[in-house]
Amino acid sequence: MTSTAGVQPQNNNNNNNNNKQSDFIGFANLPTQIHRKIAKRGFDFTLMVVGESGLGKTTLINSLFQTNLYPQRHIYTGQEKIHQTIKIEPSTIEIEECGIKIRLTILNTSGYGDNIDCTDNYKLILNYIDKQFEYYFNNEISFNRRNISDNRVHCLLYFISSLTRGLKPLDITCMKALHHKVNIIPIIAKADALTSNELIQMKQIIIEQIHKHNIKIYQIPDCDSDEDEELKEKNFELKNSLPFAIISSKQIYEIQRKKFYGRIYPWGLINIENSYYCDFLKLRTMLIIHMQDLQQITHEIHYENYRLEKFELKKLIQEKDDELRRIQDILSQMKGQ
């Protein structure tokens, strides 16, 4: 028998510490691990810009992501635009910030709305989006599906001319054709052509037209209840700013050692990142904060709808084939008799 003489009971404080350690499983480290994996692997995001020529699509993208996508871009003359067809031009850039890598693909739809008859312009865009869904679908059902590149269109910035005071028939037709395939964010281009009152009125008109024609634009989600009040207030402001009114510029100015994109007018200089003048900063903030949500909606709603249509079509084709085979068997039996 082992003697217990001289053995002292353990300190209660040590017992409490041991209990605390045994209660800790380690799930609290998951966000850090997920962040580390995302930072190492990076992620893909595809942004499509749609709108007529001359609305500042390229300028906006360059200033949003501080890059120069088309340094030697050809500017079409009026005569060339008559015979020009719509083209979808992809450009991919890699951005790394604070250890996070993003492969950003910009899809420019040059030639959109430039022809006399533009009624079918949306079809090429629709076909392109469907092709990316098909490519992802085929890779998903293949044997090697570990590293599927995601080229699906996660967000579409639709540019609306500030000179029309609302949506044109082409805008309505295009957005109605695409809204169940992609997340649409309406943009009022060249908002400096409008006074403050005109801009407020135009936003109201566009929202009314969107509701009237049952166009589904991207709905900025509400913040979680446990988020801080500053983020909730910022998110509420973003939701109330749609459609975003944008002033673009590729010119960088420096005042008091601070560099910014701006535009010079006869009456002075404006900083396009100043929310008093336009929604440029709000648009960039929205894309950053809700980038993951845009990807999630693309995958869980738009892509799942495509998959469902695909499977239903396959089922229908299979039923037709079975029916045709049954008829052929009956005819063969009749001939044999």
Image (cartoon, grey):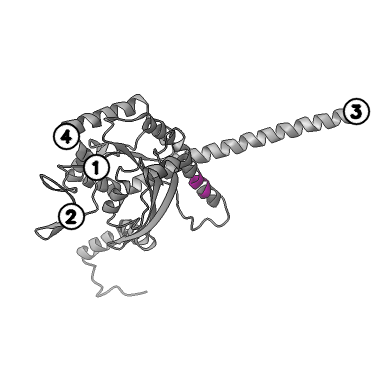
Q: Nearer the viewer, mark 1 or mark 4?
A: 4
The amino acid beneath tag 1 is Ile
Q: Which element carries disc 1, helix, strand or loop?
A: loop
Tell me the crowding category of disc 2: few under 14, some 14 to 19, or many 20 or more residues within 10 angstroms, Cα based.
some
Among the 4 quarters of the image, the one containing residue 65: bottom left
Q: Name the residue under label 4.
A: 195
Question: Percent x, y for residue 107?
Answer: 40, 49
Tell which circle, 3 or 2, labels the residue nearer the N-terminal end: 2
156 in the magenta segment: no
Q: Which of marks 1 and 3 is in front?
A: 1
Query: What is the magenta range?
Result: 131-135
Q: Mark 3 points at which residue?
A: 337
Gap between marks 1 and 4, in whole Å?
A: 13 Å
Do labels 3 and 2 touch, CB within 8 Å?
no
The residue at the point 26 percent across, 30 percent down is: 165
Q: Mark 1 points at which residue?
A: 246
Q: Name the residue under label 2.
A: 260
The amino acid beneath tag 3 is Gln
Gap between marks 1 and 3, in whole Å?
A: 77 Å
Tell me the crowding category of disc 3: few under 14, some 14 to 19, or many 20 or more residues within 10 angstroms, Cα based.
few
Q: Which residue lies furthest to the top in this view?
A: 212
In the image shown, does 92 or 301 lie closer to the viewer? 92
Q: Which element carries disc 3, helix, strand or loop?
A: loop
Tell which circle, 3 or 4, labels the residue nearer the N-terminal end: 4
Among the 4 quarters of the image, the one containing residue 31: bottom left
